[in-house]
Amino acid sequence: MLSDSDQPTPSEPQRGTKNGAGNYSSNGASPGINGNDAKELNLDLTRQEKRAGVRAGDTYVRVVRPHGHLFKKVAPGVLRVTEEAIEPQTPLLQLFAKVRRVMIGEPLPNAAEITERLTKVKALAIFASDAMSSVAYATEEILLVLTLAAASGGLEYSVPISMAIALLLGTVAFSYRQTVFAYPSGGGSYVVSKENLGVMPGLVAAAALLLDYVLTVAVSIAAGTAAITSAFSELQPYTVIIALAFITIMVIGNLRGIRESGNIFAVPTYIFIVALCMLIGVGVWRLFMGLPPVEAPAPHSGGGEPVTLWLLLTAFSAGSVAASGTEAIANGVPAFKPPESKNAAQTLVVMAVVLASFFLGISYLAHQYQVSPVEGETVVSQLARAVFGTNIFYYIIQFSTMLILILAANTSFNGFPRLAWILAQDGYLPHQFSHRGDRLAFSNGIVILGLMAGGLIVLFQGDTHLLIPLYAVGVFLAFTLSQIGMVMHWRKTREKGWKQNAAINAFGALLTLIALTIAATTKFTRGAWIIIVALPLLVGLFLLIFRHYKTVREQLRSTKQKASAAPLRQIIIVPVADLNLAAQRALDFARGLEEQVYAVHVTEDPELAKEFSQELYEYDPKVKLIVLESPFRAVVEPILRYIDALHQQDPDAFVTVILPEFLTAHWWQRLLHNGTAAQLNRALKPHPNVAVVNVPYVLEH
């Protein structure tokens, strides 16, 4: 009879024996935290106990898993770690864990990844918030340029320029729709460019996208802050503080996982959609009915520059930020629920339609109501006052605009970590970017993005107009490379309808190349040069990281098919200052590794060294003592030089340094000790053919 239990049963301590499977069975009790009695091991943490049955002579075997709450046995030699096993042990760490769980939620196992996928409704809120939010400032950027020629009729070109940008947006969105089906694994411009144009174009696209994501967070947060300070002017001195607080909220929200962030941020996105529909709908209705503005916008105070082609191109470049964010869905296809590509494509189409409608609607209303940019108030704020007046509807428009502008950063908080993960997998970014946190989010990428965006907010004092000139170059560079890459993709695959698809992508590449040229030219002196300089530097960093990882792989690549017949020659040394219990435990540990052990004693007093030598001989005459007299009172350096000297005699020998170390009961007590063991540990780590083993002795008080 065989029964199973996850709880230990009381038994008398006894010595176990090794079984045929190489494990040990034992009911032995621990001799104490610092004891050195050998423990009998059962490697799968399972033991069998014979028990007497109910009837005389009956016996049965009981399977006991005393650590079943920490490790679940799933197969022979395979144990699955439970959530309880990763719980911190110290009170301070336990408190930190509780605070972290309140902020970002309970840890999720890998199996929960499929449940973190997004529906189309949530995906629109997460991936389209960046694109939709641009309607809050794209029209204003066009008008800022055209106002320079207001007296010459420059503002009359705002709607035609908006229509040209809408055409660009539609072309880019349709082109990325094809990318979604061709590359369902995600990666967007980077993957498309790398596979079809080569490594360097792929890295350029990746660098452009990463910079774009950082700028998206900075611009959207700054614009969201401007929306709220437009309604409450007394908050303007606190612009930077408010913006940094918003970034912190975004970081915490995204650390909770992609599905959780969708739950948090979906409602504000749809509130903005309803609010903009209400603003545009009522505004157009009032125009149709011939009703005057409820509150007349400030009169034009622009300049009298002539309307030139350069001016129009500059305005087009300024407003083309409306197309930013359209690549986010192509980058995050794996985040959708199955069928991933179909759901992503449908979401992309909805996003493009909503964005184009809102952008054209805002531009049309701004033209009809003769709204122009003024200091301290956004164009959307002026439109809301003109359509509704300063009432509850105005504040709903402003509040929802602020929310969508802040949530626009959420697109980057999903795109940046995912792209960084792909680059880390390919070896172009540190492997830490591939780490998933408690909630299956790419935590390191989220935190780094928040820090970089926060740095830009501080550097540019949260001024949207200073940040936007940095914005469009990277966006359209990535767009252009992606579209050219898709043309090459269709030429290589020659799937059904490939000529038509290639023509669409070629047209998209032409438009985005024109937009890129215009943006780089017109915005160069206004700050775009920073991005143009940063791009090659970032690509160089990618290549430097890749070369390091390649070098590491080559140096660590094993050429042996089997283990060496002869083990490495070892020299075991134990630095000992005093023959206390910690030192004795380290010496006992060392003798378990090698028969011959060398104790190294550094002293500045030769007479005390003689007394120590006699004490060590009485403790264990087999341990050989090396005394290093140090008249200049140094401890760490003499030991390092002694190890170097040993290696000069036998370069192939492996020196194992056993460090006795006592652990204090309280953290503050560590400050009362010199920490020589820790210093030696740090100093010996870079040394080749040196292994450092710390043998702890735990103090009780």
Image: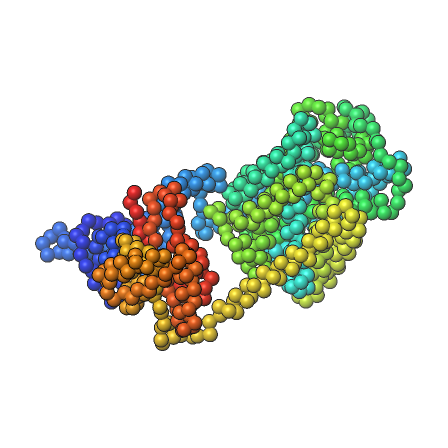
State left or right for residue 609 relative to residue 493.
left
> Where residue 298 sits: x, y (%)?
80, 28
> Where residue 243 sits: x, y (%)?
62, 36
Residue extending furthest toward the bottom: 565
Is residue 430 something one can see in this rendering? yes
State left or right for residue 278 relative to residue 148.
left
Occupied quadrant, residue 647: bottom left
Is residue 355 something one can see in this rendering? no
- Does 128 appear above or below 639? above
Q: How many marks?
A: 0
Residue extending furthest toward the left: 56
Colouring scheme, one of rainbow, by chain, secondary structure, one colour: rainbow
**Which residue: 73% across, 31% down?**
376
- Does 508 appear above or below 323? below
- Does 323 appear above or below 299? below
> Where residue 216 sits: x, y (%)?
66, 45
Q: Quadrant of the N terminus?
A: bottom left
State left or right for residue 535 relative to residue 622.
right
**Which residue: 25% across, 66% down?**
622
Q: Quadrant of the C terminus?
A: top left
**Which residue: 43% across, 67% down?**
644
**Which residue: 49% across, 41% down?**
104
> Where residue 77 sits: x, y (%)?
33, 61
Between 668 and 473, the one lying in front of the other is 668
Between 649 and 678, the one lying in front of the other is 649
